[in-house]
Amino acid sequence: QVQLVESGGGSVQAGGSLRLSCAASGHTVSSYCMGWFRQAPGKEREGVAVIDYDGSTTYADSVKGRFTISKDNAKNTLYLQMNSLKPEDTAMYHCAADTVPIWIGYTGSFGYWGQGTQVTVSS
């Protein structure tokens, strides 16, 4: 059974930083494509960043230069380092994993989905 458990969310002021973690069990992060997605109340889900099998990354324009996605194969964990946070980054952040490449604009279901961690940025 594959499980994804996010952590690291919290409340910060604008300009602050957070690092989200997604601990995977039941599969190895090195063999899956993975990504971070977010959803704010009343808004559609938005792709934030994805990382492919070979480590190549894609970012939403809104977070380029501020967020960094990475994975630690030894710890079987996916990360999202978020710097220079803005109030518009406030959302529930979820990690996703799949055996096929993940398109950052995909709006359907993924093979595996975590419960999420809340990020709140105040101005």
Image: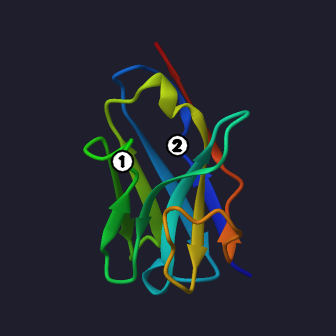
Q: Residue at x 37, y 32 (%)?
A: 17
Residue 56 placement: quadrant: bottom left
Residue 98 numbered mark, or none: none
- Residue 35 x/y as whole percent: 50, 64
Its colouring scheme is: rainbow
- Residue 21 x/y as whole percent: 49, 54
Left or right of 123? Residue 37 is right
Taking depth in this image into account, of 94 and 65 the one nearest to the observer is 65
Q: Secondary structure at mark 1?
A: loop
* Residue under pointer 2: 8
Residue 27 placement: quadrant: bottom right
Q: Categorize mark 2 by other alpha carbons within 10 Å: few (<14), some (14-19), many (20+).
A: some
Vertical placement of residue 88 versus 48, above or below: above
* Residue under pointer 1: 61
Farthest residue, direction left: 65
Q: Please, what is the three-letter code of the amino acid marked with disc 2?
A: Gly
Q: Please, what is the three-letter code of the amino acid marked with disc 1?
A: Asp
- Residue 69 x/y as whole percent: 37, 58
Vertical placement of residue 31 versus 5, above or below: below
Q: Categorize mark 1 by other alpha carbons within 10 Å: few (<14), some (14-19), many (20+).
A: few
- Residue 64 x/y as whole percent: 30, 47
Q: How many dots with numbers?
A: 2
Q: Residue at x 69, y 67 (%)?
A: 108
**Which quarter shows the N terminus?**
bottom right
